[in-house]
Amino acid sequence: MKNKATGFRSAGYLCSIFLLALAGCGGGNKGQLVGVQGREKWYQADPYGMVYIPAGSYNMGPSDQDVPYALTSQAKTVTIPAFYMDNTEITNNEYRQFVYWVKDSLAHRLIGGEHLIDEGEYGERINWRAKIKWDDEQNVETLAELFLPETERFYRRKEIDTRKLNFEYYWIDLKAAAEKDYTTPADNSAGGLSNRAQGRTDRSVFIKKDILNVYPDTLSWIHDYAYSYHEPLTQMYFWHPAYDDYPVVGVSWKQARAFCIWRTQLLNSYLEENGDAFVQDFRLPTEAEWEYAARGGLDLSPYPWGGPYIRNSRGCFLGNFKPMRGSYQDDGGVYTVKVTSYWPNDYGLYCMAGNVSEWTSNAFDESAYSFSHDISTDYVYDAKESDPAAMKRKVLRGGSWKDVAFYLQTSARTYEYQDTAKCYIGFRSVMSFLGRDKADY
């Protein structure tokens, strides 16, 4: 008599044979729904310099009284999907990689020849394997237009004309593509169609383009403050090695967005070259994501480090801001400090309070909390040059080296205009996580 264990083994063997036959070569699915076979397993690798922020819900907004009666936020429970965030603010050296890339791309196109790859009807793309020989006699004259003219050189120093460092970039306006078609018969008779209607036959209407100078406004150190001696920072802050690990400043919201788009293309180009799948885009965080990350899992804490105080038990300040009555040095830095100064919060994020204020992707509206959704809370508006100034306001979070302690609170929000660069505003990038949770992998 055959025992039960032997029977189970036999049944398992027959089941394995059946599954192998079902997914065998030659499309042997036997008419069953088995999905597309042969797809490689994929794992979300942590982007370099970023930390994982798990999905969760929290109480967004103030957990204490609104001391200045600003009335710009209210308590609201929101839910945030998982994402990655830079563990520090973008540094001078990291942003310099972007500036150098733009400079080199212009040089490649000016030299031409082996520096460009002809793609037929798609035009040409840069051959990044070709080395730029800046001192080559044949290239000196060709690349001369990238440098300051002799009449503008200080002590005859041959330097790049930063006014030429323009970056052409694109993005897709998915919100416009998702809008309902409100075209009326009158619109059609006049030959006018909404973007949605035109997009049915020509989706290029949703592809947006901009050309932007990427060099930081180093003069912001001077024009932000009258009757104050900041010339040393204007002259050295962005390019000198001493400030490599300090947060980049003098970058507008539009420049920060352009940086994120460039960073996305830089990574995707590498992934494509290696036959790997693309990942989510780098982008500026929504203010809901920023506040969630800044809290570090501490729901009702007013500061990223927890507790209601801005000093530790030894009396040392926990962030870089304007303490007391303008004693800037008491917290360890007169201006900005290195991006890894002070202890990180429980998610491993440095300087989420103080050092520099940070751009978010959101447009600023005092009542945004009242009408925005409670899942992936977001309010955006892509302001045009012709729009009034009030439509160009973008949300700032975190406070800076020149702010009082109130603005270091995780719930504090203020704004600046999207085309404005300040010596106390920087940014960091985020990337949405692919999937539910890292535990799924």
Image (spheres, grey):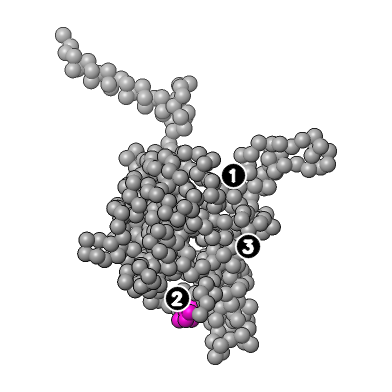
Report the amino acid beneath label 3: Ile
Q: Residue furthest right?
A: 189
Residue neighbourhood size for the residue with mark 3, other residues' Cα within 10 Å, grouped as few (<14), some (14–19), many (≥20): few
Which secondary structure type mostly characterizes the magenta part of the structure? Answer: helix
Q: CA distance from mark 3 to mark 2?
A: 25 Å
> What residue sits right under mark 2 in the picture?
237
Q: Secondary structure at mark 1?
A: helix
Image coords of residue 394 (percent x, y): 54, 56
Above/below status of 74 relative to 308: above
Q: Does residue 84 appear in this view?
A: no
Q: Nearer the viewer, residue 111 or 226?
A: 226
- Identity of the residue drawn at 62% across and 54% down: 391
Q: Residue furthest bottom?
A: 155
| Bounds of the magenta segment | 228-235
For the N terminus, the quadrant is: top left
Image coords of residue 105 (percent x, y): 56, 67
Q: Is residue 233 left or right of residue 207?
A: left
Which mark is drawn over residue 174?
A: 1
> What residue sits right under mark 3 in the picture?
211
Q: Secondary structure at mark 2?
A: loop
Image coords of residue 272 (percent x, y): 49, 52
Report the amino acid beneath label 2: Tyr
